[in-house]
Amino acid sequence: MWSGAARRLAVPDPAPDPTVYPDTDDMGEPTLQTFIVDALMPLVERWLAVGGPPTFVGRNTFIYWKQYNATERLAPDLYVLPGTAPKTQTSSWKTWETGQVPSFALEIVSTDVDKDYIEGPEKYDDLGVKELVVFDPAYADDLDERFLWQVFRRVGKRGLVRVDATNGDRVRSRVLGCFLRAVGEGSAVRIRLGTGPHGDTLFPTFEEAERATREKAEARAAAERTAREKAEAKADAAHAAREQAEARAATAHAAREQAEARAAAAHAAREQADTARMNAEADRDAERAAREKAEAELRRLRAAPPGKKRRG
């Protein structure tokens, strides 16, 4: 599928093309640019994969857009090529063959300031990119003419127009759908992706994302462990309370049995006392009856006439 910009740039010539299109200029890359792109490229790859279908993200690859003209070329420090599978292997891109031009390009200003400030934007306009961001880590060397950030966007028939130039720490990329933020200073400066309405939240690196995932898992495990310990402590407390209640119930039961035993003993003692009393009364009654009988016999004997033989 050819992009509109690629269709405007060239129609491939079916005739054999004898032109030599170099894959490199053998000039190398300043270390700061290398460090910045090394840190940024995997972030852009992961960000685009999260926000939509995976897209090819490349660096320092020659892009040719005019067949038979090997001098018209660019090698962005970082670029996004829509419609191309990630990790596609190539030594250079020729738009008349692929039908694709970068939607986004990043240039990090090197010692050749004019190339990145003047020539670069004109060539990117000719190439047909939608958005170009120019990052100048050494902008403070000339605050009158240079900026930390410049953003160029394609605006209708006007082509690639500079829409922002700032020394603030961030600019918004419409193509990427996030902010580009300068983090650190001097040789430690890096470009990070900022998310949210104002780019305040840094999109995590792979290591940061792994660490955050690990910390979340550890926090979740700690919370589960705390909840489990609380539940166990609650169960232990309930068990202890149940044992105390059972002990109190056993004590009460023993006291109740002791009270019942004492009551039974008291009842038996009362019954024994009643029996003894009844026996004593019976004995007394028997004694009284015997006494009364003896007294009656004695009275009878006394009442009998003298000289009369006692009976029996």
Image (spheres, grey):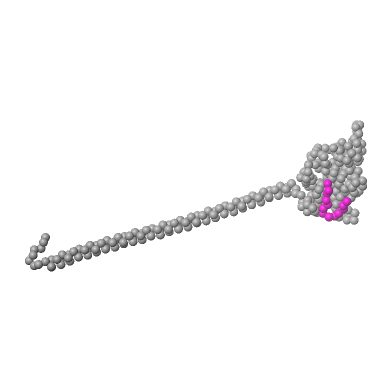
Q: Nearer the viewer, residue 144 or 236?
A: 236
**Residue, x 85% and y 42% (percent of image)?**
102
Assess whether residue 168 is covered by the magenta stretch. yes
**Residue, x 8% and y 63% (percent of image)?**
309
Q: Nearer the viewer, residue 129 or 236?
A: 236
Q: Quadrant of the N terminus?
A: top right
**Relative height, residue 252 to residue 177 (above, below):** below
Q: Is residue 232 left or right of residue 301?
A: right
Assess whether residue 8 is covered by the magenta stretch. no
**Residue, x 75% and y 48% (percent of image)?**
205
Q: How many marks?
A: 0
Image location of residue 79, percent across then percent down: 83, 44
Image location of residue 189, percent across then percent down: 80, 52
Image location of residue 247, percent across then percent down: 47, 56
Q: Is residue 242 left or right of residue 26?
A: left
Main SS category, magenta section = strand
Residue 105 sits in which quadrant?
top right
Q: Which residues are magenta?
A: 163-175
